[in-house]
Image (cartoon, rainbow, N blue to C red):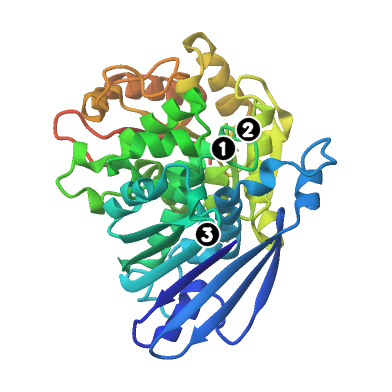
Amino acid sequence: MLLTVSTTMNPATDLGYLLFKHPDRAQSFTTASGTAHVFYPQADEAVCTAALLLEIDPVALAKSRPGGSHVDDRTYASGSLLAVALGSVFRTAMTGRCDARPELPGTAIPLSVHLPAVACNGGADLAERLFAPLGWQVDARPVPLDEQMPGWGDSRYLDLRLTGAQRLADALHHLYVLLPVLDDTKHYWVGEDEVAKLVRAGGDWLPTHPERDLISRRYLAHQRGYVRSALAQLAELDGTLVEPEPVTTRPLAAARADAVIAALREVGARRVLDLGCGGGALLERLAEESAFTEIVGTDVAAGALDAAERRLSRLPDRVRERVSLRHSSVTYTDPGLAGFDAAVLMEVIEHVDPPRLPAVERVVFSAAKPAHVIVTTPNVEYNPLLGSAKTRHRDHRFEWTRAQFRSWADGVAERTGYTVRFGQVGPVDPDLGPPTQLAVFSRKEA
């Protein structure tokens, strides 16, 4: 599978800085499905082209599956395989970071993306519907089954070329999400962590995409529960519901993590607990901050911890070694969680049945007793602006008003020897408040 990215910006060779891959070097990277090669067929000041060639090892791919010993059809999920390789090889570029040219990541540059053979279950029309709303000019040409036998018709593959002025990180995120959507299949089991992956990669553009529902269904392998969860989260991120300029609206999931990290910095925390870490999205963000010297993620669900482990396995070893995972519940005392600088419950308490909240209070504030506790939870008053009068997630046991959250937090602080202050996350409506509520508890004796 081959993907090329070209630019004519001046100088064009700055593409190498954006991709963190030097134009004068051919590099190879081992992936779970084979070997990814990165090289530059052309690199001068006028035109620079970077190529990603994925060489599949079908036997190794089959054996990587639990109990697998035979070659199976996963090798033909080409869009999914290429997207995973792209996310691995160009991971830093996708974050929008460029140390050598810090002004480049935020600049739209002329780009041409070429996939000479990309699987597409829906033909050229689908490619147009997916990429054109994102500002791409789309040239999609069906590849014939056999050029010598035109009567056989076209294959399910397209010769696809995308051109337009885009930030490189945005372009990579478009491809990362939409390549498996074109193919409508994945080469691996789709679990709950895929929802967070979709929201993270598509949060800046997917909420307002006209094919948002189709993209979510295909990306999440048509698993209805995950699709409903993703659409609910994307609805939260849809700035058009609350802001006249949705392009500049910070995705709510990212804004929550930003607010939590800012609070941790403010209190000077270095050893941090992420209680109810789920698939590890916040853990990954915390690991990127060198100020946090020890990070422990806990969850009651073994599947969530498996997903978090897979996410963290992509981090460099020197970063990954600061993070550990622990099977634990916020409703049962765990002596191993005592003595930390701070504990985070980000979008956790609303998943607990109300009669169990006193147990959470006892476990977190009286047993673990960190110096600081940071809690975020939805503001139910804001839900009408998100198009929902009910809870935002099918697993939420409740969602509180601002007054209810303050009452609970004030009571916890008074009973357990903490002080508490409150914050707001996301765009604030003058009448309904923010979409997310935040409380920072600080132990008085600390």
Q: Nearer the viewer, residue 255 or 94?
A: 94
Say whether disc 2 or disc 1 marks the residue closer to the N-terminus.
Answer: 1
Residue neighbourhood size for the residue with mark 2, other residues' Cα within 10 Å, grouped as few (<14), some (14–19), many (≥20): many
In this rendering, the count of numbered labels is 3
Q: CB under 8 Å between callouts 3 and 2?
A: no
Q: Which residue is mark 1?
A: 193
- Spatial distance from mark 1 to mark 3, Cα to Cα? 29 Å
Residue 386: quadrant of the picture:
top left
Amino acid type at image mark 2: Ala
In this rendering, the answer to whether 329 lies above or below 234 is above
From the image, tell me which residue sits under label 2: 304
- How crowded pointer 1 is (Cα within 10 Å; few <14, some 14-19, many 20+) is rated as many
Q: x, y (%) of residue 72?
A: 74, 41
Label 1, secondary structure: give it. helix
Q: Earlier in the sequence, mark 3 or mark 2?
A: 3
- The residue carrying pointer 3 sits among few (fewer than 14), some (14 to 19) or many (20 or more) residues within 10 Å by Cα, namely some
Task: Answer above or below: position of 360 versus 443.
Answer: above
Above or below 372: residue 224? above
Q: Which residue is mark 3?
A: 117
Can residue 421 be seen? Answer: no
**226 w.r.t. 151: above or below:** above
Distance from label 3 to label 2 (Cα)?
Answer: 35 Å
